[in-house]
Image (cartoon, rainbow, N blue to C red):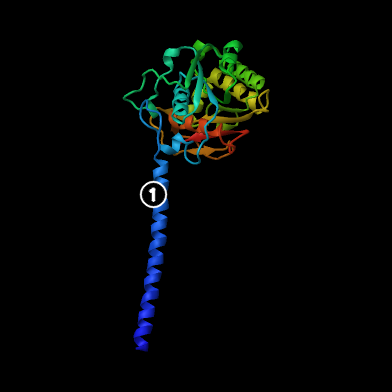
């Protein structure tokens, strides 16, 4: 009888141990399932839904909603992605463009099926104007609700001039300071200023020739934040490598200027996602970063 009792006791302890282990595993699986369910939430019905990690700030972290995000260059490749993704994230967006017809669903995060269709939302305000005109830039901030700015200016120098980037960004900085807006992400390019060594050789050839004036403008544009009138802002300079039009991957490298690495390519949608992220987080403030796939 004593032996039977000892065996029974050992059996009960073993059962309790297995039960405890099973309960622990069930609890962990439940936590994982809840995390997966939470990460699958998507919004904004126009076009394809973004991957949840991008809709919440790209790669890691959850971006809180802002008052209103101002996007300069919302008719361009990165700018249209920033507008679309900002709306998808639940933010209000105001954008300054030269042509309202260019505010469309982007092919990357919006999907090829709806790419090019007019982008409309009750949370979107479109201002038609010229970034080189200070009054037009001021009109973007006139409602007093802008809390973050994405600058994604571009265009052929033959059409916009050789100093558009610098002149326009100077107006944006002036308007931000008048309204007390601090957060800004500025899109330039790999190869600008101290990221020169990270540019591929063939791209450097373009920098020496066809893009010479454009890069002189980009360097001066960056200097407005690095050591100019905008140095007191909470800025992040974003230097993307070769740009693609594909959907967001959420997978890319963020390199400091002294990183010994040659940049490759990256989707415009990923660049825009990073720009939205850095105006909501503190990690990358006050520096220039190269971004590549």
Query: Circle 1 is placed at which residue position?
Result: 33
Q: Of 218 and 117, which appears nearest the observer?
A: 117
Q: Position of residue 123 (x, y in %)?
A: 47, 22
Question: Is residue 187 at least partly visible in the picture?
Answer: no
Quarter assignment of residue 244: top left
Q: Of 77 and 220, which appears nearest the observer?
A: 77
Instruction: Assess disc 1: are there few (<14), some (14-19) or many (≥20) residues with their C-alpha within 10 Å of its C-alpha.
Output: few
Question: How many numbered marks appear?
Answer: 1
Residue 103 vs residue 218: left or right?
A: left
Q: Position of residue 47 (x, y in %)?
A: 36, 26
Residue 37 vs residue 164: left or right?
A: left
Q: Of 25 and 221, which appears nearest the observer?
A: 25
Label 1 residue SS: helix
Which residue sits furthest bottom?
1
Q: Residue at x 45, y 20 (%)?
A: 122
Q: Residue at x 39, y 40 (%)?
A: 40
Q: Position of residue 109 (x, y in %)?
A: 39, 29
Q: Residue at x 59, y 16 (%)?
A: 142
Task: Look at the image and tell me in which quarter the N terminus lies.
Answer: bottom left
Task: Look at the image and tell me in which quarter the C terminus lies.
Answer: top left
Which residue sits furthest left?
113
Quarter assignment of residue 235: top right
Q: Position of residue 34 (x, y in %)?
A: 41, 48
Vertical relation: 47 (above or below) 166: below
Question: Is residue 178 at least partly visible in the picture?
Answer: yes
Residue 29 vs residue 290: left or right?
A: left
Residue 41 vs residue 278: left or right?
A: left
């Amino acid at each position: 009888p004593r032996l039977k009792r000892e065996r029974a006791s050992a059996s009960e302890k073993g059962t309790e141990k297995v039960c405890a282990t099973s309960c622990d595993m069930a609890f962990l699986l439940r936590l994982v399932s809840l995390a997966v369910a939470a990460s699958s939430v998507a919004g904004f019905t126009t076009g394809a839904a973004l991957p949840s990690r991008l809709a919440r700030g790209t790669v890691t972290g959850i971006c809180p909603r802002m008052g209103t995000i101002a996007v300069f260059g919302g008719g361009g490749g990165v700018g249209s992605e920033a507008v679309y993704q900002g709306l998808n994230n639940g933010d209000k967006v105001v954008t300054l463009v030269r042509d309202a017809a260019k505010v469309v669903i982007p092919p990357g995060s919006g999907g090829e099926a709806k790419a090019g269709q007019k982008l409309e939302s009750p949370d979107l305000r479109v201002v038609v104007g010229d970034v080189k005109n200070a009054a037009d830039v001021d009109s973007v901030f006139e409602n007093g609700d802008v809390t973050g700015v994405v600058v994604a200016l571009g265009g052929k120098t033959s059409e916009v001039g050789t100093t558009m980037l610098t002149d326009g960004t100077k107006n944006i900085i002036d308007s931000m300071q008048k309204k007390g807006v601090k957060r800004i992400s500025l899109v330039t390019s790999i190869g600008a200023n101290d990221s020169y060594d990270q540019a591929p050789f063939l791209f450097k050839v373009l920098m020496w020739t066809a893009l010479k004036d454009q890069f002189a403008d980009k360097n001066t544009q960056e200097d407005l934040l690095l050591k100019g009138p905008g140095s007191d802002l909470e800025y992040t300079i974003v230097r993307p490598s070769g740009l693609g039009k594909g959907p967001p991957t959420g997978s890319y490298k963020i390199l400091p200027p002294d990183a010994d690495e040659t940049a490759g390519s990256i989707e415009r949608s990923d660049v825009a996602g990073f720009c939205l992220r850095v105006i909501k987080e503190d990690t990358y403030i006050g520096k220039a970063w190269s971004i590549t796939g």
